[in-house]
Image (cartoon, helix red, strand yellow):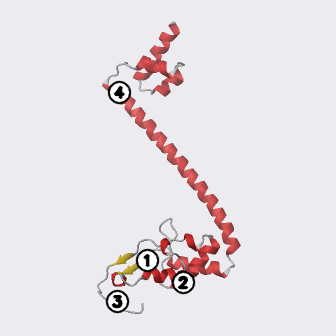
């Protein structure tokens, strides 16, 4: 019984020093429910509450820093593995003319500022070459490719989606909503374009 009294006194002393329940449990060998019962109505001064809050905030900050460090390390490892895999793929395809052409086209006309693959061009032949490249080297079938048109407002009634669907062999259901860009012209400058 004397040891339980001493353990309770030790727990109260540690609590006054700003220790959390988990930290106290490392020093005082009792069940967490027992500790909770002992300290439930334990009065703390404003200063003791402040110390406890600061320690709790510091623990949270340390936990966030540890988590960020682990996430950073995991990302670096994923990037390293992806780089190794990409290097092997590159070495396997580097002498293929279609691969070289697709890389050059993407370098010139591809989106490089986000994590999605996007190729932008108004020449249907060039878009078809890029679609062949995607099908061969990703490999993603054309039926799974999404398309979005960006056109000037005077082309709104031209059925551009149907024309592009036929030109590149991608179903209309794979077309996202067309974006019509404003222009200072109310009519088409090049009627056959």
Q: Which is more N-terminal, label 3 or label 2?
A: 2
> Where residue 149 is drawn, which disc sits there?
1
Distance Cα–Cα, label 4 vs label 1 = 61 Å
Residues tagged 2 and 4 counted as in contact (Cβ below 8 A):
no
Asked whether residue 12 appears in the rendered view, the answer is: no
Res 88 quadrant in image:
bottom right
Q: Is residue 6 left or right of residue 74?
A: left
- Residue designated by label 3: 188
The local crowd at label 3, few if under 14, some if 14 to 19, many if 20 or more residues have their Cα within 10 Å, is: few
Marks 1 and 2, how far apart at CA: 15 Å
Residue at the (68%, 74%) spot, across then down: 93
Q: Element under label 4?
A: helix
In primary-sequence order, the first of circles 3 and 4 is 4
- Which residue was labeled with disc 2? 126
Where residue 57 appears, x then y in whole percent? Answer: 40, 36
Q: Nearer the viewer, mark 1 or mark 2?
A: 1
Q: Is residue 89 left or right of residue 72?
A: right
Disc 3 is placed on an element classified as loop
User: Residue 155: x percent and y percent?
Assistant: 37, 84
The residue drawn where x is 47% and y is 20% is: 35
Which badge, 4 or 1, is on the more N-terminal residue?
A: 4
Determine which residue is flagged by label 4. Answer: 49
Report the Cα–Cα distance between label 3 and label 4: 73 Å
């Amino acid at each position: 019984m004397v040891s339980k009294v001493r353990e309770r006194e030790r727990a109260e002393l540690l609590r006054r020093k700003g220790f959390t329940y988990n930290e106290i449990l490392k020093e005082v060998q009792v069940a967490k429910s027992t500790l909770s019962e002992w300290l439930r109505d334990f009065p703390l001064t404003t200063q003791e509450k402040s110390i406890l809050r600061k320690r709790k905030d510091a623990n949270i900050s340390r936990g966030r820093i540890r988590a960020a460090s682990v996430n950073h390390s995991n990302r670096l490892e994923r990037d390293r593995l992806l780089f190794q895999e990409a290097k092997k793929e590159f070495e396997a395809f580097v002498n293929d003319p279609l691969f070289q052409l697709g890389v050059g086209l993407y370098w010139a006309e591809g989106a490089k500022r986000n994590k999605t693959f996007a190729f932008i061009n108004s020449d249907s032949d060039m878009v078809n070459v890029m679609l062949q490249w995607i099908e061969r080297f990703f490999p993603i079938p054309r039926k799974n490719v999404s398309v979005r048109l960006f056109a000037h407002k005077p082309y709104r009634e031209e059925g551009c989606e149907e024309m592009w669907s036929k030109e590149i062999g991608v179903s209309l259901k794979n077309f996202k909503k067309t974006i019509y860009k404003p222009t200072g012209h109310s009519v088409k400058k090049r009627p056959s374009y």
